[in-house]
Image (spheres, coloured by chain):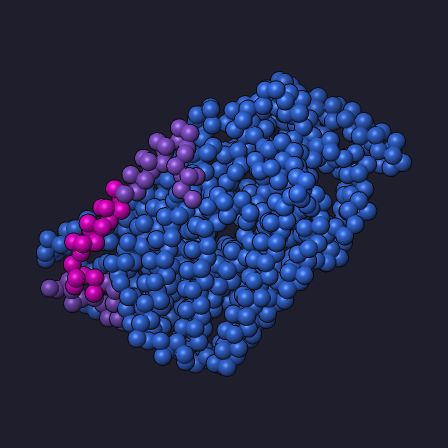
Amino acid sequence: MFNQIKDLAGGELYLISSLIMFMVFFIIVGIYLLKLNKKHIEVMSELPIKENQSKGYEEN
Amino acid sequence: MQLERFTYDNKIVRNFGIATLVWGIIGMTVGLLAAMQLFKPAMNLGNQYTTFGRIRPLHTNAVIFAFVGNAIFMGVYYSLQRLLKARMFSDILSKIHFWGWQLIIVSAVITLPLGFTTSHEYAELEWPIDIAITIIWVVFGVNMFGTIIKRRERHLYVAIWFYIATFVTIAVLHIVNSFELPISFMKSYYVYAGVQDALVQWWYGHNAVAFFLTTPYLGMMYYFLPKMAGRPVYSYKLSILHFWSLIFIYIWAGPHHLLYTSLPGWAQSLGVAFSIMLIAPSWGGMINGLLTLRGAWDKVREDVTLKFMVVALTAYGMATFEGPMLSLKQINGVAHFTDWIVAHVHVGALGWNGFLTFGVLYWLIPRIYKTELYSKKLAGFHFWIGTLGILFYAIPMYWAGFTQGLMWKEFTNEGLLKYPNFLATTLQIIPMHVLRSIGGAMYLAGVIVMTYNLAKTMRSAKLVANEPAEAMPLSKEIVDHSAADKAWHRVLERKPMKFMVLSLIIILIGGMVEMMPTFTIQSNVPTIASVKPYSALELQGRDLYIREGCVNCHSQTVRPFRSETERYGEYSKAGEFVYDHPFLWGSKRTGPDLHRIGGKYSDAWHYNHLVDPTSMSPGSIMPPYPWLVNQQLDITTTASKIKAMQTLGVPYAVGYDQKANDDLKIQADQIAAELKQNNIKVKSDREIVAIIAYLQRLGTDIKANKTEIPTN
């Protein structure tokens, strides 16, 4: 299964640099997620089901 | 600050909803007709406007851009207003958007059967309609961003991110895949040729699935599912991860549509690698959706809208697991060009898009009419007949795909193809096609029942065209109460334009890494000295091949498998397609590949086969094309076509456009004379002569100089 992405006859550069690009991007999003404020998450996730505005959080 | 009173525009939501229902029935009915044509050629109805080659694009365009398109706008216009606590930016823009989109669809319904097509799958509409699509898409974008700017909710909920990504990516895809050089009012040539054209098309084609059939629907899922279940999404963090990784990865996966073709190997491998990675965000989204229902499964038993949502998410999960598997070369080698792909697509289309649309319609229509659904029983019936319809559709298609894919590859002990006659493999799967039509008819019946149910619901009450709402306006100054408020993403959620630009950059990375080298590095498309431009007659014949939609059933790319080189001849090389504006590799082999058809049969064979396919291939399901004999070839376009090709870099001699018709007539006379020797009397100015010239030319260039064929 992995032979098809292992032997690239000179095309490794494209694949490796693309994967590195994704990894860097993924790590940035990951760090951001870890740093997210719990209260913010709660307010955001309730946006569709709450008829009122999300005032509670901003006034903290 | 004062509480502001305003209203939500429900009329535009209702209108898009009705358009979804009407186009859904039309698009699926055309699909059913096309399905029946594949086992009963008489269903082609004996005229050129309703042959499979012309109505298959009508079916795909109608269900993708008319049915799903209108459903997207219905869902976006409903949820956007409520998530932002604001009425749509401009009622006039909403109306222009609605009527403009319907006009585009009507123009597709008229032009596709008439044979006006670019031949790029899901982008068949000709250049004037492409321009109209661009304008209306911009109208939609202005209306959406205008609403975002005048919002009363500071932060943008994740559904809106998906809508923004949809808007920006579809704009990029549509523009890049519409670089066409017009030669007349309804005819153009793609600027790209051969391998490059194929890469652009499948970058577009795959991402049309990603950003038209998936991201807006995920946005709708993230809004409507919590609404229906009465609880927030399972994990908002997961939805953020889902969003960014999905839009980053999806854009790279296009080349998996071109495995084993002459596309450079590294691009194919990139496509495979990113396709496999795509499982993670896709399943993250599906799991996030299904887990939103944790502790609420009792509701699923009673609430038909949730039933539709659960099946939709399950179908999404199945299709997004199967997609990466199909992009593995070993599986792709068997599955590609067969009904397996048709099954895969329809699990997504019927299950994910269809069922999510139905769920939203059943939930939303009674709400904007402030009434109850006319009949829950009928909705329950729709759910079951729809689910059974999907099964009756998909299972026979999988069966047909496995069967035919394996038959194509089977050898006898003596080392010969077991089924050298392609038609034998077609006839083997006819019963599966009959069953598939039954599945499709069941699904369509469900949609008709739903339309009746919703029409009754609408008639029983009055639309709340302007739904009152109230909210505090946003303060001009933003007060950051904690350091976390300044986090980049939090700021981005407040800055929609910057958010759009960042999404744009993310989706451009993949496309650029794959396309730039293919376009700029010479070694990626090695030229072959013996490959020459088409003669004027062949070029005209090629355009007839495009007009008749032959590409919908016949591929033009021989893969480097023994089973294919035995059946068709030498495998296809990138250098053979450098003058092909557009490429015509196709994606489905309902009939055999035609890249090496040139010189295989006589002109007389082709003539008889086109007029009555069963006379040469008893049992053939190809429709007859008698009008090609009756219709005169339009040679007034030859000069402009040659000129356009010259502009695109095809090396015709300077001034050849003025002499091309002389050469055309000489070649046509030769073919007519050849036919006459076989007792076929046909005037040399008929269309059939041009199409025979083209077919006889296909794949013959490299036969002239076999020693110097490059190996890519």
In this orientation, which residue lies closer to the viewer: B108 or A35? A35
Q: Is residue B540 positioned above or below B338 on the image? A: above
When the figure is inspected, residue B624 is found, relative to residue B642, above or below; the finding is below
Image coordinates for residue B582, horizontal then vertical, percent: 57, 36
Q: Residue at x 16, y 59 (%)?
A: A37
Q: Residue at (78%, 29%) from the top-left corner?
A: B668
State whether residue B702 appears in this view: yes
The x and y percentages for residue B519 are 45, 29
Residue B122 horizontal/vertical position (percent):
53, 48
B246 vs B488, nearest the viewer: B246
When the figure is inspected, residue B534 is found, relative to residue B253, above or below; the finding is: above
The picture quadrant where one finds residue B541 is top right
Q: How many marks can you see?
A: 0
Residue B634 makes an appearance in the image: no
| Residue at screen point 30% across, 64% down | B83
Q: Colour of chain B?
A: blue
The residue drawn where x is 44% and y is 76% is B304
Q: Colour of chain A?
A: purple
Q: Is residue A21 left or right of residue B701?
A: left
Question: In terms of secondary structure, what is the magenta stretch mainly?
Answer: helix
Residue most extreme to the right: B679
The magenta region covers A24-42
